[in-house]
Amino acid sequence: MQLSKRDWLRLVCAFGASNSKMWRFIDPDYPLESFEMLSSSSTLQNEPHVRAFKRVTSDQLDMIFECCERHNISVVTLSDDDYPERLREIDDPPALLFVLGDVSVLNDTPTAAVVGARDCCEYSAKAAGWFSSELAARGVCVVSGFARGIDTAAHEGALAVEGSTVAVLGCGILHDYPRGTMRRKAEIAQRGAVISEYLPTSSPLAENFKVRNRLITGLADCVLVAEAGERSGSLNSAGHAADQGKELFVLPPHDIFSPSFKGQTALLEDGAQLALSPNDMLRYLRKNYSI
């Protein structure tokens, strides 16, 4: 037997969305046995998260499930067959995902993440859109983080050719962030999925976004960094990609003297692959997929 969606949601409510501490108590290979021990063991009662676990009420869980049903949000847990297989392989996999759209696209097709700066230049945004359009037109699902700048260019590039794209959020699906983008979420859901490990109405806290980056790269077969300064959050994504063993591609810097591109230069110096066109990424993906 596996844990129910309700049990997984109770764990997330107690331990928090990114659940790294949860895996100290729950063995992903034996979740039911771990859950029962967490519920009954007298030796764990002084643990703060165990006390929080016991305080989660049925009414709280009912409200979350009712909210999801009202807004056509699916709850996909680690016990479900349609849980993204690539995420099972990362450190601290999300115990559950809230999904608007069809998450199965992540198990059925090759995937590529396109990441980069929010305040990007025209060159980088244009290139990110071109790469994403070409990849999506050839059956690759484009994964990005739904932020301004490069992320927006990536999602819009895939949608422009009626390809599939997945947005990974650093807040709840029902939170209008970036402001005024709820319609774009609906468009992405029609061609792929919008996913989040955060409860549907959760606010976009600053610390959520670096945590979220492990999912963007974890869902991808390869990753493109389209613009990154020396302190860019995209370098955090690149670090996750390296830790996860993902092939890392980098767009040629527009200006090697500009601080806005120092992160790309550093990644190339460290051995990342230079991506001069989408064909560079497609050649890599063709090693494992017929595209």
Image (cartoon, rainbow, N blue to C red):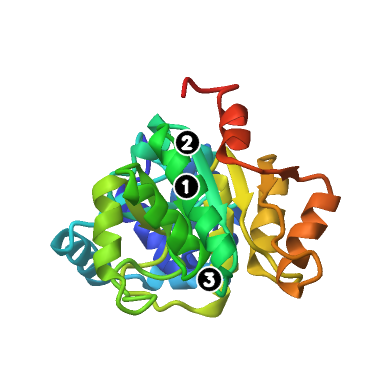
Q: What element carries label 1?
A: helix
Q: Name the residue under label 3.
A: 208
Going from N to C along the chain, the mark reached first, 1 or 3, is 1
Q: Name the residue under label 2.
A: 85
CA distance separating discs 2 and 1: 22 Å
Q: Is residue 141 above or below residue 35?
A: above
Q: Is residue 283 above or below residue 30?
A: above
CA distance separating discs 1 and 3: 25 Å
Instruction: Give the amino acid at mark 2.
Output: Glu
Q: Mark 1 points at which residue?
A: 132
Quadrant where the N terminus sits is: top left
Going from N to C along the chain, the mark reached first, 3 or 2, is 2
The spot of residue 138 in percent (x, y) is 42, 32
Q: Are marks 3 and 2 in contact (CB under 8 Å)?
A: no
Residue at 35% across / 34% down in the picture?
81
Q: Residues within 10 Å of mark 2 (few under 14, many from 20)?
A: some
Q: Are marks 1 and 3 in contact (CB under 8 Å)?
A: no
The spot of residue 85 in percent (x, y) is 47, 36
CA distance separating discs 3 and 2: 22 Å
